[in-house]
Image: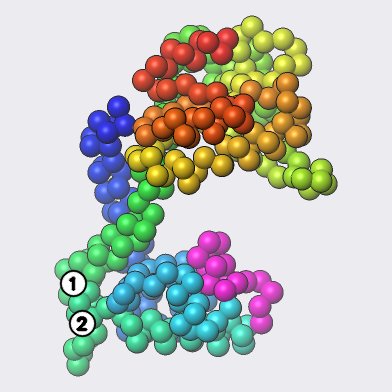
Amino acid sequence: MYNEWFLQFAPKAFRETRIQTTRDVEAALRFTDNLTNIQPAIMEKYPEILPTLRMSTCPPLAVDRLIGLSGISSNLVKCMEIEKKLPVRMAAATIDTELAKIATVIERMADPDIFVWLSRKEPSPSEIEVHRAATIVADRLCGAVANPIIRNAQEKRQLAAIKAWLEAHNYRQLHGCDGAKFDAMPPGTFSFRMNVPVKLEGGIQSVIIPIDAVISPKATRKGNFPIFFEAKSAGDFTNTNKRRKEEAVKIAQLRSTYGKKKVQFNLFLCGYFDSGYLGYEAAEGIDWVWEHRIDDLAKFGL
């Protein structure tokens, strides 16, 4: 089932992401005069262009490699990469100095086979050359996050399958605007990507964790918690072994906060999950439903 979906839809999902990323790269090239004017002021104004600059070098630079080569603060680079902004507590003069070091590295390592105009006496690229370069850089950016792109597309499809099954069984979807909290959902309702607060170890600090699908059974009693489901897909067995602790951490946090008897935390699986993965999850008290056997949702009292 996973392989059939992958062959049919994964290329489309990847291409759609690459098309949008290509537009973002073309914008970054405009801001930097097609990589001929990489100034601190430009990066200060458009901090979101840093990933494009990293992927414009030969070879492309990982975040930590850029930090090491330029000898700058990891905080600056990670703020620009993750939050798309500059650190608020860093002095302006320090930011200018650090960004100048980044610019020096990028200019020195810019890929001459992609940005062919940089070696010309008058570096004025044609529209075709810019689009070609942007497509290559976008492909590098998407290639670095290929698995999350595919996983996100698969998750949307899985949640759509759950929605279709629940609505066929007369459940009603709640949306964010309805204002219902996870522990106050009316019977016979469900919601996606719902935020559930949990307490960290020690019970002092609280954080919010999103749950993919939260379902309140039609026959639920007052005071009972809804049933939680996480949508999981995997294209190979190795990937699941790396991720299997994620669910164990979630269920431990939920049970520590709300009690073991109240929390029902389960998985909705499609793809390559072997007995090692399933055994690990079962040992943590986590049950699952295979997507190709979606009617097994009824066994949870739904």
Quadrant where the N terminus sits is top left
- The residue where tag 2 is placed is 117
Q: Quadrant of residue 207?
A: top right
- Of 213 and 255, which appears nearest the observer? 255
What residue do we see at 20% from left, 66% from top? Answer: 132
**In the image, residue 43 above or below residue 216:** below
Q: Which residues are magenta?
A: 74-91
Please rate how many residues cluster around mark 1, counting C-alpha atoms within 10 Å: few if below 14, some from 14 to 19, many from 20: some
Which badge, 1 or 2, is on the more N-terminal residue? 2
Residue at the far top: name it: 219
- The tag on residue 129 is 1
- Of 185 and 73, which appears nearest the observer? 73
Residue 188: image location, x then y, percent: 59, 12
Q: Amino acid at mark 2?
A: Trp
Q: Quadrant of residue 113?
A: bottom left
What residue do we see at 27% from left, 33% from top? Answer: 3
**In the image, residue 18 above or below residue 42:** above
What residue do we see at 46% from left, 82% from top? Answer: 69
